Image: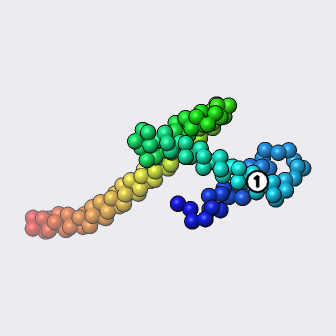
Amino acid sequence: MAERPEDLNLPNAVITRIIKEALPDGVNVSKEARRAISQAASVFVLYTTSCANNFAMKAKRKTLNAGDVLAAMEEMEFERFMEPLREALEVYKKGQKGKKEVSEQKRKDKEKKTDSENDKSREEEEEEEHMEEEPEAENEVEEEEVEN
């Protein structure tokens, strides 16, 4: 758990960025207002997490999932946020799926490249071995000709 109450607050840079994105250009927010918004957001997140944790505990799980958070929002009577949250969750899942597909493709490409390099290396080794064997075979032919 947190050692100090301040440790539970959201990062100021994140809060400032969210505030700037939500307000039109040219609107300034005082330091005290940013601090109040930060504390309110932190309390909201902690309360939501606590409610979601209750749902997870009822299901005998230790890990919170998106369903727990959505159920918590409904229990806290924030139904109007449910649809935007679902949409944001879908966007997030699609983004994660895209990242996973890109990562998988990179891994496959790397394996192909490694396999290709290994094949080339094997071919070069076989060529070297074959070249080493040829002089011996020529010597045997010459010896046979000399004997005849």
Q: Residue at x 61, y 37 (%)?
A: 76
Horizontal side of 138 relative to 99 (left or right) equals left
Identify the colour scheme used.
Answer: rainbow
Task: Report crowding for label 1: few under 14, some 14 to 19, many 20 or more residues within 10 A (C-alpha).
Answer: few
Give the camera-side residue of 99 and 120.
99
Give the camera-side residue of 15 and 142.
15
- Compared with 132, 45 (above or below) is above
Horizontal side of 147 relative to 108 (left or right) equals left
Q: Position of residue 106 (x, y in %)?
A: 50, 50
Q: Residue at x 46, y 41 (%)?
A: 56
User: What is the three-letter code of the residue carrying label 1?
Assistant: Ala
User: To which residue does mark 1 refer?
Assistant: 36
Q: Position of residue 117 (x, y in %)?
A: 41, 57
Horizontal side of 51 relative to 28 (left or right) equals left
Task: Say if residue 101 shows up in the picture.
Answer: no
- Compared with 74, 21 (above or below) is below
Task: Say if residue 75 shows up in the picture.
Answer: yes
Horizontal side of 13 relative to 60 (left or right) equals right
Q: Residue at x 42, y 38 (%)?
A: 59
**Mark 1, secondary structure of its residue:** helix
Quadrant (top left, top right, bottom left, bottom right) of the C terminus: bottom left
Q: Position of residue 40 (x, y in %)?
A: 71, 50
